[in-house]
Image (cartoon, rainbow, N blue to C red):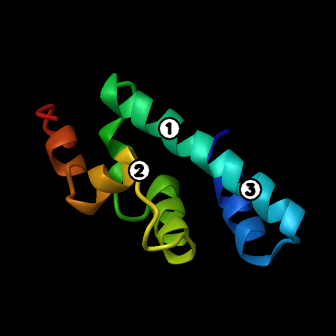
Amino acid sequence: MNVEEALISCKQLKDGSNVEKQSARERLNMFEQYVMDQINNYAVSPDIFLEKSSFMNWWKDFQEIIETSHDSPLRGFMKICRYRQYEKGKF
């Protein structure tokens, strides 16, 4: 899944049927894991963390629709702004 597909899944999670919501949640969980794996391997450009990037747009949308109890390594990484360290190669 790429960022654009993740944005579509966010829309389905907000507005879709129960079946679509379940499927979207599963895809988004897989996307979160994929992104965190890529970050851990320094396999993504720091540019994804620019304010207007597709990834940051997805992240904002995703944060608005997930439960506050949702916890994941990516959420922790983003919540404490560790991407700023990543940009400097110090993650």
The reply to whether the C-beta atoms of the residues labelled 1 and 3 are less than 8 Å apart is no
Residue 72: numbered disc: 2
Residue at 43% over, 69% down: 69
Label at residue 24: 3
Amino acid tagged 2? Ser
SS assignment at label 2: loop
Q: What is the secondary structure assignment of the residue under circle 3? A: helix
Residue 67 drawn at (x, y percent): 51, 72
Of label 1 and label 3, which has the lower sequence position? 3
Label 2 vs 3, first from the N-terminus:
3
Q: Residue most toward the front?
A: 69
Q: Are marks 1 and 2 in contact (CB under 8 Å)?
A: yes
Identity of the residue drawn at 54% across and 61% down: 58
For the residue carrying disc 3, how many other residues have a C-alpha within 10 Å: few (<14), some (14-19), or many (20+)? many
Residue 52 or 33: which is nearer the viewer?
A: 33
On the question of residue 4 being in view, the answer is no
Question: Would residue 42 be found to the left or right of residue 22 on screen?
Answer: left
Q: Give the residue at x 46% y 62%.
A: 70
Horizontal relation, residue 52 to residue 24: left or right: left
